């Protein structure tokens, strides 16, 4: 990235900045995107974190590497996969994103005037989807997306998700005439989901992920009988990993609460969120099952929930897995409920990853043995009629 900085600064100085107003630009989308990137704090980070997607038809006017340019069909597929823009009539396109659990993204599309509203609406939906994807898991990244912006000028529509949105916007504007033509798009006024009299959102399955629950009965049977000969290779690996965790965390004489807390602490402290869930191809099915967290050390929400379910079943603690939603029914989500001394409690190990530590050196969890009201107030939705209500506020400690 450093090799581009001096060139980009020169480009900024050469861009039209005075004289007659002009709502057109002769700059390729790649140049516009690079100029915007140069005005963000992210540009100072390792260039290897950035992934560029550029239109090969503009390669002669660009500065990218060969593998960063894509054909018409490849760009069509990318625009469809990233933003849901299928069969879009476009002239030029440039997208730069950061790898890993980073929300940073700049996209510039040049389209005919009649296609501009289509792109704007797709970008609006995309911002909501990205915010939902990070909500709960990565609050700082979710906030970055929430502050994202869509700009339009002439034939270009730009999407900005970065630390320095005003600076990036100014850089975008400098590509046109005297630099005052960019128009911000109003917030997308999506109808708020219907609410129940108690203030909870009516639950609607987002149907974005396959939330089919893993059947752990064979593994449990092998655990109790000591005979794993009938298990598949993968289930044997899950059983072995679960046994190791159980033996490490559970000791004779522990109360059910202490067992639950010890296993919860291990799961949230030793397993990572599968970052591929944020990427185009999505996470593998193993991350939705105990295999991901227990064997591979990473998973998504359903993987965390089903792994916790297995550990609770091994500890003979009554537990259920809840498949519901988050971010106002836009994202599928999963968590658990446990029953201690006749009272139900909610736990969300995924949203408690890498907990804080208080002054006494104890982990501080936000979603360990909480009430259903707390879950609802923190953007969880579920089928309220078929799931027990957790009302106890004592957290289950003996």
Image: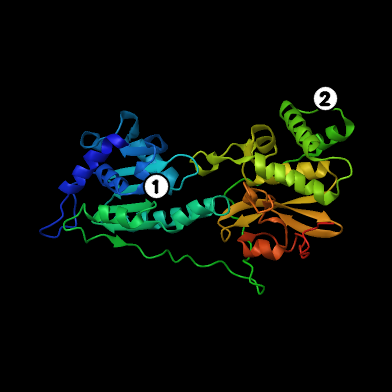
Q: Residue at x 59, y 47 (%)?
A: 209
Q: CA distance from mark 1 to mark 2?
A: 49 Å
Task: Say if residue 89 shows up in the picture.
Answer: no
Callout 1 secondary element: strand
Comparing marks 1 and 2, which lies closer to the viewer? 1
The quadrant where residue 395 appears:
bottom right
Q: Residue at x 64, y 71 (%)?
A: 196
Residue linked to disc 1: 105
Callout 2 secondary element: loop
- Relative to 12, 253 lies left or right: right
Q: Give coordinates of residue 19: x percent, y percent.
A: 10, 58
Q: Give coordinates of residue 298: x percent, y percent.
A: 62, 38
Q: Tell me whether circle 1 and circle 2 mark residues in contact (CB < 8 Å).
A: no
Residue linked to disc 2: 229
Quadrant containing the C terminus is bottom right
The quadrant where residue 387 appears:
bottom right
């Amino acid at each position: 990235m450093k090799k581009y900085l001096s060139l980009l600064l020169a480009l900024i100085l050469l861009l039209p900045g005075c004289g007659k107003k002009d709502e057109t630009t002769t700059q390729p989308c790649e140049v516009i995107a690079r100029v915007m990137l140069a005005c963000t704090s992210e540009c100072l980070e390792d260039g290897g974190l950035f992934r560029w997607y550029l239109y090969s038809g503009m390669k002669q006017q660009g500065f990218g590497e060969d593998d960063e340019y894509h054909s018409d069909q490849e760009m069509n597929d990318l625009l469809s996969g990233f933003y849901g823009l299928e069969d879009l009539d476009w002239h030029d396109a440039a997208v730069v994103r950061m790898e890993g659990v980073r929300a940073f993204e700049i996209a510039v599309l040049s389209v005919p005037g009649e296609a501009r509203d289509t792109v704007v609406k797709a970008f609006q939906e995309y911002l909501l989807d990205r915010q939902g994807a990070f909500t709960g898991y990565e609050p700082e990244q979710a906030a970055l997306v929430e502050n994202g912006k869509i700009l339009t000028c002439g034939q270009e529509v730009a999407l900005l998700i970065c630390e320095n949105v005003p600076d990036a916007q100014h850089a975008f504007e400098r590509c046109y005439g005297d630099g005052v033509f960019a128009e911000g798009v109003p917030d997308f006024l999506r109808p708020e989901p219907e609410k129940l009299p108690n203030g909870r959102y009516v639950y609607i399955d987002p149907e974005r992920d396959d939330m089919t629950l893993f059947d752990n009965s064979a593994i449990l049977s092998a655990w109790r009988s000591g005979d794993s000969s009938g298990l598949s290779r993968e289930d044997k690996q899950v059983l072995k990993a679960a046994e190791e965790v159980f033996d490490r965390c559970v000791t004779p004489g522990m109360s059910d609460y202490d067992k639950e807390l010890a296993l919860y602490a291990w799961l949230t402290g030793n397993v990572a969120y599968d970052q591929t869930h944020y990427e185009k191809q999505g996470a593998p099915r193993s991350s939705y099952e105990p295999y991901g967290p227990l064997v591979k050390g990473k998973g998504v929400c359903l993987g965390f929930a089903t792994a916790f379910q297995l550990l609770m079943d091994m500890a003979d603690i009554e537990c259920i897995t809840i498949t519901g939603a988050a971010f106002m029914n836009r994202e599928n989500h999963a968590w658990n409920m446990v029953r201690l001394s006749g009272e139900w409690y909610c736990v969300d190990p995924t949203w408690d990853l890498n907990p804080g530590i208080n002054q006494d050196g104890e982990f501080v969890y936000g979603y360990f043995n909480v009430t259903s009201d707390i879950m609802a107030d923190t953007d969880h939705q579920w089928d309220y009629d078929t799931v027990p209500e957790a009302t106890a506020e004592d957290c289950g400690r003996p």
